[in-house]
Amino acid sequence: MIVLTEIEMEIAAMVGCRRRSESRSNSREYAHGFDGSGGWDIDIEGAAAELAYAKYRGQYWPATVCSFKHADVGANVQIRSTPHANGSLIIRDDDNAEHFYVLLTGTAPTFQVRGYIQGISAQNDEWRQAPNGRPAAYFVPQSALKPFEKKDNQ
């Protein structure tokens, strides 16, 4: 379990707001059938999850804006989050198959790291779904994710 501090929450909120406002000011289209509802929350929670993962791993978080399909932390790690404790990690067809994808559950300030999978390993037809009329994606169950090794301070 990772709990962000007040200042970490403020930083994540600023980054999330910057991401949303930059996309709006450049009239970016929403991707993957997303209708834009709750976009501010999604961007803030996403930034908070990235920061939480970086804190968990003791890594630098670059807090990037406009990086889209590039790594969120390190050279090849992308963070995905859901408020649902039993939620799946979603991998899309246009995601980098060489990157590693990490699932965090919860909402800021509290997250839990559920595990990771490499993009190529996530492309299992058994996990492919197209819920709510949106484009199909791979919904990787938590049981298929690899756990992180415990650190001495965990």
Image (cartoon, rainbow, N blue to C red):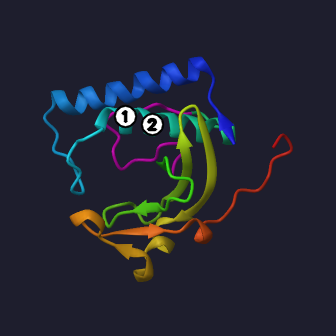
Magenta-span inclusion, residue 71: yes
Q: Quadrant of residue 57?
A: top right
Q: Which residue is drawn at 44% across and 82% down?
A: 126
Identify whether 83 is placed above or below 55: below
Q: In this view, does 58 lie to the left or right of 14?
A: right
Q: In this view, does 140 lie to the left or right of 142?
A: left
Question: Secondary structure of the magenta portion, mostly?
Answer: loop
The numbered mark at residue 121 is none
The numbered mark at residue 41 is 1
Q: In this view, does 140 lie to the left or right of 146?
A: left
Identify whether 79 is placed above or below 6: below
Label 2 Cα crowd, 10 Å radius (few <14 / some 14-19 / many 20+): many
Q: Residue at x 55, y 49 (%)?
A: 105
Where does residue 115 sit, x and y in percent of width and height?
A: 62, 58
Magenta-span inclusion, residue 115: no
Where does residue 121 sit, x and y in percent of width and height?
A: 51, 73
Q: Residue at x 56, y 49 (%)?
A: 104
Q: In which quarter of the image is residue 37?
A: top left
The range drawn in magenta is 61-76
**Cα–Cα span, label 2 and label 1:** 6 Å
Q: Do the residues labelled 2 and 1 touch (CB within 8 Å)?
A: yes
The numbered mark at residue 45 is 2
Q: Residue at x 53, y 68 (%)?
A: 141
Instruction: Name the outermost residue toward the bottom.
Output: 126
Disc 2 on helix, strand or loop? helix
